[in-house]
Image (cartoon, helix red, strand yellow):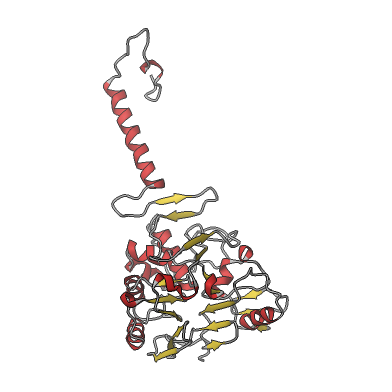
Amino acid sequence: MNPTDTTNLSPTCGTEKRPTTHRRLWRYITAFSLTALVILCGATVHGKAAIQVTPNGTKHFYKRSLDTSGFDVQTRDIGDKSHLSIYANLVPMISINNDPFFETANVRRLFAVGDVHGCLKEFNELLAKIEYDYELGDRLILLGDLVNKGPDSVGVVRRANELKALCVRGNHDNVLIRIMGYLRGHNVRENTKSGKAMPEGPVVDPILFSLPHWEIARQMTQNDYEYLASCPLILGIPGLNSLFVHGGVDPRKSLQDQIPFFVMSMRGIDLDGTPTSGRNYLLNWSDEWNLFQLANMSAVEKPFTNVYYGHDSVRGLQLKTNTFGLDSGCVFGGQLSALELKSGQLTQIQCGTYAKSPTSK
């Protein structure tokens, strides 16, 4: 009899036939296999993340959320996800619905900080300069790109996690998260000079095996991954009428229709009105955002009229009416910037030079 045939194992005329040793062994193997499958597909065991595959094929790893103690938090499923990597594990949007400046959450000061890019020394110097104290009610919002280019990406992620900093996902963070997701299921032996890309579906920004992010990913722990992956694409604070992103927000589209790639990477608007991540464009996206706000034409729902962002180190600090760009090129020898949102006070420190600026020849 085929070992999977259990027809004769059911009671017959009040008497149950005893399974043979071979059948009993097969039952144990089957039970063990099913248990292992459950663990792999939908359980967290001893603090380690397990893979969960959604109906559209996107692979998620169970993770902790950001520390939002004292906040009234809502997670929103927004954005056009048609070109997301199966390893993106993206939190689309978190909205903090407390009163303005979180008085009821006992927040004393709220800082938005530009791209840190692995510059741990400068990050700590900035924290010391603003006399940051979480216990006294200070809070941080990191505007993405915690990693890559600088000397200690892993150290920055761990420091941010230790500080319980809020954050949004940057384009370099996104690459690292996708690589870490891929590494959990693959033993990568690809030649870094092969020019090949990581298989992850129809993405608009393929990840080459030659990128430096691979080495950073191999140094990161599960806790590091969980913190970084929990940084949403968009952080919204209705009480401040504000969105926090890494790249930008397209004023021609509702939040539901925003494209994650451009939210993390846009710099400008092309002649046809579409966002671009390139450096040659017709109009800075933030100028268009301000024009749309002035004309009351924005497709982004109220009350969101302000955007805080990073990413655009070439233009540097950009503080306008409704947009506040805080990437001042720290990793390229510029400054690391922190803007306190209650007072409007800007604090900067001078950084070392760890990478070549995109404007350098």
Question: Who's the residue at 32% across and 68% down the image?
Answer: 219
When the figure is inspected, residue 308 is found, relative to residue 8, above or below; the finding is below
* Badge count: 0
| Residue 248: percent from left, percent from top | 57, 75
When the figure is inspected, residue 347 is found, relative to residue 193, above or below; the finding is below
| Residue 14: percent from left, percent from top | 34, 9
Which residue occupies the extreme left position in the image?
A: 21
Q: Is residue 194 visible?
A: no
When the figure is inspected, residue 32 is found, relative to residue 332, above or below; the finding is above
Q: Is residue 299 visible?
A: yes
Which residue occupies the extreme top position in the image?
A: 13
Q: Nearer the viewer, residue 289 or 310?
A: 289
When the figure is inspected, residue 3 is found, relative to residue 265, above or below; the finding is above
* Quadrant where the image shows the N terminus: top left
| Residue 352: percent from left, percent from top | 37, 90
Q: Nearer the viewer, residue 26 or 48?
A: 48
Question: Who's the residue at 33% across and 76% down the image?
Answer: 134
| Residue 181: percent from left, percent from top | 42, 59
Question: Who's the residue at 30% across and 54% down the image?
Answer: 47
Q: Nearer the viewer, residue 35 or 219?
A: 35
Q: Nearer the viewer, residue 137 or 235?
A: 137
Question: Who's the residue at 39% across and 21% down the image?
Answer: 6
